[in-house]
Amino acid sequence: MTPEPTPLALELRDLDVVYRVRGQDRQVLRGLTLTVGSGESYGLVGESGCGKSTTALAAVQYLPSNGRVRSGSINVAGRDVVRLSRAELRKLRATEVSMVYQDPSQALNPSIKIGRQVAAVFRVRGIGRDEAEERTAAVLRHVQIADVGSVMNRYPHQLSGGMQQRIVIAMALAKDPALLILDEPTTGLDATVEAEVLDLIAQLQAELRTAVLFVSHNLGVIGKMCERVGVLYAGRLVEEGPVDVVLQNPRHPYTVGLIRCIPRGGVRKDHGRLDTIPGFLPPLGEELPGCVFVDRCGLAREICHTVEPPLYQLGEHHISRCHFHEEAPELPRVIPADLGQPLPLDRSSTALVRIEDLEKIYRQRGHTVHAVSGVSVSIWPGETVGLVGESGSGKTTFARALLGLVVPTAGTVEVDGRVVPPKLARRSREDVEALQIVFQNPDSALNRRHTVRRILRRALKKLAGLTGTAAAARLLDLVQSVRLAERYLTVRPNQLSGGLKQRVAIARAFAGEPRLVVCDEPTSALDVSVQAAILNLLVELQVERRLSYLFISHDLGVVRYLSDRIAVLYLGRLMELGPADVVFDGPHHPYTEALLSAVPTIDGGGRERIRLEGEIPSAANPPTGCVFHTRCPRKIGPICEQEEPPLVTVERDHMMRCHIPIEELRRLQQDKDAITA
Amino acid sequence: MARFLANRLALSIVTLFILSVIVFAATQLLPGDVGRNVLGPFADQKSVDLFNHQVGADRPLLVQYGDWIWKFLHGDMGRSLQYQVSVWSLLGPSLVNSLKLAAEAFVLVVPLSILGGVAAALRRGRLADRAITITGLSLTAVPEFVSAIFLIVAFGVFLTWLPVNAQWPQGTGLVGQMRYLLLPSLALVMVLFGYIARMARHGTIEALSADYTRTAYLNGLGTTTVIGRHVLRNALLPTIAVVATQTGYLIGGLLVIEKLFNYNGIGQRIYIAAQNKDVTMLQSGVLLVGVVYLVATFIADLLYSVLNPRIRFGSVE
């Protein structure tokens, strides 16, 4: 008796999916063909709007009500899901396919206990109550949940984001599905939590041999998690191949562009600008007779406009849909690399901003929460200080205290050596003008009822005191300086794309002549090509105006690109402060080391992951001694639990808060690199 | 949860206190003094003074207020100035009548409008949805005296199916009373249906598009299970809060309906007291409605927190 050959986990053939918008069918997926073999992990990348999530939803037949499969077939575990009856589809969903999506707090029902929610997966397959409960406990243990009994009796909101995502993964794997679809499963999680979740997925996948379709905009994550990758653009697969081949030797201009946008491999602003992809994704459902990427392609020629390129077979399993795939690696740069070098910094002069011993204590239900304790940082003119740390580390509180949006419990903020009042309302107009902010989400930062012109004129009036013709002239300067076309002045923010909105938000911050701009995750909601353009803009503005930035981001590649110095916060304490290269290249603080090792990069391999045990402790009840000792992989002994290490200068310009001597850290960290290399 | 409820309770007490002060102050603003108002313009000053002394209206305001509240808290609402009997002997039966009407309207409107709202949400954008939404909205826009008169004319006068007078004769049984209350209750249903249905529809649509609903479907659960177990419970939480705010209106705000159907409810009682400057009756009546309103709201809060684990197990700030 020979075993039946295992069917492909997912097989899409010439799939066309359309959304009906205002009475017209708009094509979202264009003849998409891809397969995920049994036990294989396949990554699907592309920018927002290119059809990644639609592909995932089509596979489980859960398209929005205006979406439908127009032609082509979708086979999951050998069954054509388009043709399944309702009951058959339910059965397929109950047994063969699972999906995990972005926000775990939304994916769990807030009013049902964890135990019951997970058990439902077993119950629907006709398993009895007691057995379902037992198997629930088993599957939760499998995703490394420590206190299973108590977790089962809790509601989702009582768990952290990382725990919630593990529960969702447990639920997804409880069916032992043939196919697991992961749609941006770690976007929005902290780097350390993301790394843990990814490790868990990789481990479970290796164990269970579940096929995975991994949808993500993050090439680093795909590189770490997948064997093969497909690049999607405007609903069409433009390149596909083994993940290391595609990432190291991309042969479609879109893939090349995507990879070039990402600041990586230690690239810094003084090495040159990031390249971007010009233009925008074609609108939904646009007729594209030639190559879908033609309007944004640096290699485009006559033929690209008229003839749809076939799939060129480039090597084993590597395909590209580009007429000129041989030239793709030499895609001309859109942005010349060498635009204005940042001026060298002069730290002998007075610092622009000096923050001394800043402390912020919140009172919450009788607890005192030390959001920031005793942080001192100075920022010189023209300098960027990057601020990193997990959520809850005090980054935002620190920035807000600097801006006067939060009144610190203790400590001072100096501008040009002058102490400024802690409250924003008490600060002089020059001081308010001098310190500005660009928020993460331009949607909520811009008044959507006002036109761009009105938003900026108001900012000019409030920050620069300009009205009338003076304001009108300055307004034009302003939109030019953020490379925003004048025609956008008359529209409202909701008519703009994310990148354009962020430009408006930056223009608003620049209405007065700011001297320091706090950038709070300004690019984390943007696609990489847009992110690159915004980062370039920030550098150009810095060069032109000798601006300083306090740059907050969880994307360490971005922080490294932009920052001259890096400050690492943990539980409100400054753990390390030093020049960007030193902090990144080491020797670094054990916490920084763990943060860095958590980030998956395209360059792959490299660092060995350092696991942080447990979750970031509550700031209401920080550990004794060194606050990091509960999770520190390099803890040396009782001294770490009893005595808080002081923040000392370990090298020139490099400060660290650790009991381990710097030379010892250097040795330990070099040894590790030697092992992995 | 205890913390949440304690908070709400404390807030209710503060609200009642403020209400009592406002009511008391307002009655003091009525022109003329109490004795003159009751005894009329031709009574001599001496008997007016004597009357004021008897009812305690000549004492300092603070003392009068304190005395009123103290007695109110002990269940003594004083004597009606107009009828010279205890206020409670008149207010009590009116309150019971009001509660009966409110209960009937409540029992009709809540299931009906929630059903309507959920049905509309499940057929969003289709004919049934538009019909329910537009009907509800139009009914809400029609003033209650118009819809009430329409009901009276249609069912009471032409079809003569139902009594036009809501006040049942002595000795009518409970079922008979319900028949008498049907027309005014229907008028109230017409007022409230659109509002509650709209909330239920909105909540359901939100829950239907929530990720956890998708999770449930993708786990292979059937539509009935998904709606019953995952959608409704989360969808109806905000509706409960809305329903609670309407109970106050159902009990104390029905003057027009009571008048049209000639029903002796607490709204009419307070209205008459105000017309006749029956200060004690007016004060205690309004405060009583306030108490009923806050009790209803508190019950809703209790229900809400029992159904919502995010409140039951703190963490929502």
Image (spheres, helix red, strand yellow):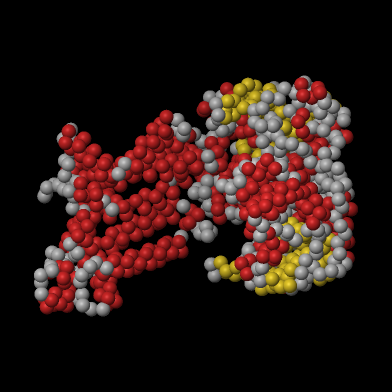
Along the line of sight, which residue is nearer the eye, A79 or A27?
A27
> Residue at horizontal 13%, vertical 68%?
B40
> Residue at horizontal 66%, vertical 68%?
A428
Q: Quadrant of residue B248?
A: bottom left
Q: Is residue A583 left or right of residue A81?
A: right
Q: Could you tell me if residue B111 is visible in this image? A: no
Q: Quadrant of residue B192?
A: top left
Residue B56: percent from left, percent from top? 19, 76
Residue A574: percent from left, percent from top? 74, 66
Q: Could you tell me if residue B194 is visible in this image? A: yes
Residue B304: percent from left, percent from top? 42, 53
Q: Is residue A277 left or right of residue A32?
A: right
Along the line of sight, which residue is nearer the eye, B283 or A33?
B283
Along the line of sight, which residue is nearer the eye, A191 or B66?
B66
Q: In which quarter of the image is residue B81?
A: bottom left
Quadrant of the rendering where the N terminus of chain A is positioned: top right
